[in-house]
Image: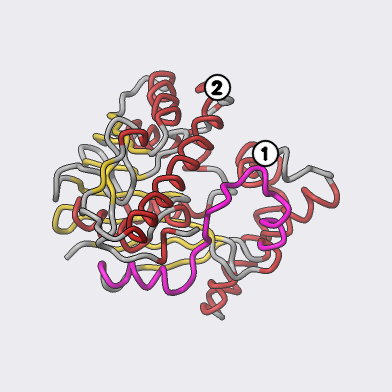
Amino acid sequence: MDAGDRNDDRRFRAEGGLNDAKIISPLSRPEEQGFMNDVIEHLKKEESFHDDWAKTVDPASVQVKELACACTMPETRAILKELGDLKGKRVVELGCGCGEASVYFATQGADVTATDLSSGMLDLARRTAEHHGVAVKTHQCSAEETNLPSESFDVVYAANLLHHVNVENTVKEAYRLLKPGGVFAAWDPLAYNPLINVYRKIAVKVRTEDERPLRRKDVAVVQKYFGDCKTSGYWFFTLFIFLKFFFIDRVDPNKERYWKKIINEHEALKPIYAPLEFCDRALLTIFPFLKWMCWNVSVVGRKK
């Protein structure tokens, strides 16, 4: 099931891991308790999936600088340009994963709190930070209910997160965490591109079963809280690289994550990627509505 279609007031807090999950609102009817059991089961699956993934990753292999600067990471390059100088700013990342972004923010002088549902990923993020000579605070929680202080951060960042969670609850929580004038920045996959949808049907072993790519209504939720957001699409013609991986390089999408491979091989891919990105920019400038047919979308909004 997908928790994203449920009501805001049905929320949970995970303390000490999901085995000790506590229900915030008392539930009297059996169907409500059944719903919460489904939500907690969903979260346990997410935690287990990412714990197992974290065990396979060497902190020295986590590509911190590449995530921010690689030619094949147009989403983060654009967001970092919007965020500007991070020195001295308080930043919280929701769903930090391996810790690439959190550690990069710390290398830029930010005071960083990395949050994740997975204790394994948080441990990996800590070790990655140590490898790069910086420190990040870590906090295990769901993105919908962080239990962090209100209006205590200058930036709330979420990468590849919203399609795993209840969008309304997560954006509402981000709004609560931000100081007035603070910035919410997120990027995630969209639901509409047919090529990516074929990839999703094939690559079932490297994706969680309950993830839900964003639709226009989900982006509208961000706009509801943050007003006139800057919304940009990425990967249209550049998706030719996925076709190259599959048909020319014969890379099994169930054995290697394509969206990791584009970072790992960014230098080798640059001669192909650069002209394709130029075409993307030209196309989306002339026909901005085609951003909804891209693989990924970024949304940047400021709390008034």
Q: Residue 200 appears at what percent x and percent y? A: 66, 56
- Does the segment drawn in magenta span residue 200? yes
The quadrant where residue 104 appears: top left
Residue tagged by mark 2?
58
Q: Assign a secondary structure to mark 2.
A: loop
Q: Residue at x 25, y 38 (%)?
A: 87
- Does the segment drawn in magenta span residue 90? no
Q: Residue at x 60, y 47 (%)?
A: 207
Name the kind of residue labelled 1 in the image: Glu
Side (left or right) of 202 relative to 145: right
Residue tagged by mark 1?
265
In the rendered image of this protein, does residue 112 appear above or below residue 222?
above
Closer to us: 273 or 8: 8
What stretch of residues is rendered in magenta?
197-225
Q: Residue at x 39, y 55 (%)?
A: 34
Name the kind of residue labelled 2 in the image: Asp
Say whether disc 1 or disc 2 marks the residue closer to the N-terminus.
2
Marks 1 and 2, how far apart at CA: 18 Å
Of tags 1 and 2, which is closer to the observer? Answer: 2
**Quadrant including the C terminus:** bottom left
In the rendered image of this protein, does residue 125 appear above or below residue 183?
above
Q: Are marks 1 and 2 in contact (CB under 8 Å)?
A: no
